[in-house]
Amino acid sequence: MAAEGLRFTDGYSNSSVCSPTRFALMTGRYQYRLRGALDEPLAGGARGRNDLGLPPEMPTLPSLLRDAGYTTALVGKWHLGYPPHFGPRKSGYMEHYGPLGGGIDYFTHRDRGGVYDLFENDVEAHDTGYVTDLISDRAAKFISRQTKRDTPFLLSVPLHGTALAMGNP
């Protein structure tokens, strides 16, 4: 990208905590205009609530890029609201692998309330292993698949911070 004139030389976060930062990154809007960003952290008590999350009808970076022909994937934590009202595949990601909430136990994949929270495309994924390794492996496999295609992609990999990769093979 740099060879073609696109360079990212600085990065800024508009919040000190994870969900509000991703609300802003996903929407390009001031995060606190969205109710879910005000309730950081979005804990398990937000499950099933229709007022705490990223509204699916709101345009997002992944939905706009998907509509422009990009393959979009989120491999890592979502933490922007719980199903059935919210979720990565409702907000523009074509693929998702990871927890829907924030922090989960690295080995049991359960949240603080003991609820299992590792999913692949809206279905529980009962994979074993250290969650950071599982997410990293999935991200690498996604990129490997994309290099065999002639389409641009967006890959978001939020572990305990936010990572974003875009490419055009």
Image (cartoon, helix red, strand yellow):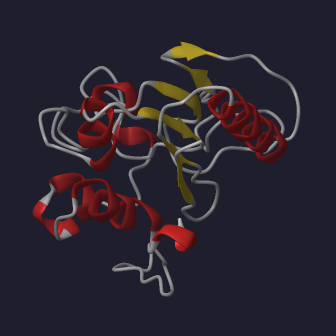
Res 24 quadrant in image:
bottom left
| Residue that protrudes farthest toward the top in the picture | 123
| Residue that protrudes farthest toward the bottom in the picture | 10
- What is the x, y in percent for residue 145? 68, 27
- What is the x, y in percent for residue 4? 48, 68
Q: Is residue 64 left or right of residue 98?
A: left
Q: Is residue 41 left or right of residue 39?
A: right
Res 29 quadrant in image:
bottom left
- What is the x, y in percent for residue 33? 11, 64
Q: Is residue 21 left or right of residue 9?
A: left
130 and 112: which is toward the camera? 130
Q: How many marks?
A: 0
Which residue is located at x 59 percent, y 50 percent? Answer: 157
- What is the x, y in percent for residue 58? 13, 42
58 and 40: which is toward the camera? 58
Which residue is located at x 64 percent, y 33 percent? Answer: 114
Which residue is located at x 53 percent, y 65 percent? Answer: 1
Q: Is residue 143 left or right of residue 35?
A: right
134 in relation to 103, above or below: above
68 in relation to 124, above or below: below
31 in relation to 81, above or below: below
Which residue is located at x 77 percent, y 44 percent? Answer: 136
Res 41 quadrant in image:
bottom left
| Residue that protrudes farthest toward the right in the picture | 129
56 and 9: which is toward the camera? 9
Q: Quadrant of the C terminus?
A: top right
